[in-house]
Image (cartoon, grey):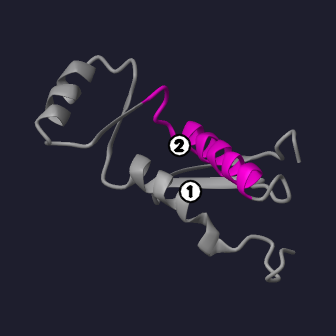
Amino acid sequence: MDKNGFVVDFSGLKPLEQRLKEQFDHTFLVNSDDPLLNYWRKLHDLDALNLKIMDNVGMEFSSEMIWQWANEYLKDNDKGRTCCWKTESKENKSNSASYERLPEWF
């Protein structure tokens, strides 16, 4: 527990929350190898969509990426005192994935 009696004080996770919002909230995710990528870029340049290009937009990859982001943040912020061992990502009721692992440094 920290000095306030928390394992992790959720109010301290605002920078991570902001990073997640920037990536996923009202964005258009597309694979970097999408055959229509140039078209999506043009629409982005016209402010028709908020384009985010990823190596893989699948839920499995997103869950792993979020796990990595969470652990980068926790390692820096808590000096390795805490970690994230599992993430779950949901696109909708029928499309979700989770990623579970302890970081090597923990």
Looking at the picture, which amino acid does disc 1 mark? Leu
Farthest left residue in view: 46
For residue 88, which quarter of the picture? bottom right
Asked whether the viewer can see residue 63, the reply is: yes
Q: Residues within 10 Å of mark 2 (few under 14, many from 20)?
A: some
Q: Nearer the viewer, mark 1 or mark 2?
A: 1
Q: Residue 35 versus residue 77: which sits nearer the camera? A: 77
Cα–Cα span, label 1 and label 2? 18 Å
For residue 53, which quarter of the picture? top left
Residue occupying the point 14% across, 42% down: 48
Question: Looking at the picture, does residue 33 appear above or below residue 64?
Answer: above
- Identify the disc placed on residue 16: 1
Q: Quadrant of the N terminus?
A: bottom right
Residue occupying the point 16% across, 32% down: 45
Q: Would residue 11 be found to the left or right of residue 105 on screen?
A: left
Asked whether the viewer can see residue 94, the reply is: no
For residue 34, which quarter of the picture? top left
Residue occupying the point 47% across, 58% down: 18
Q: Which residues are magenta?
A: 54-77
Residue to which mark 2 is pinned: 59
Q: Position of residue 52 (x, y in %)?
A: 36, 37
Secondary structure that dominates the magenta span: helix
Looking at the picture, which amino acid does disc 2 mark? Met
Question: Looking at the picture, does residue 7 appear above or below residue 75?
Answer: below
Q: Position of residue 32 (x, y in %)?
A: 40, 22
Q: Residue 95 versus residue 33: which sits nearer the camera? A: 33
Q: Position of residue 33 (x, y in %)?
A: 39, 17
Question: Looking at the picture, does residue 26 appear above or below residue 47?
Answer: below
Q: Position of residue 103 (x, y in %)?
A: 82, 43
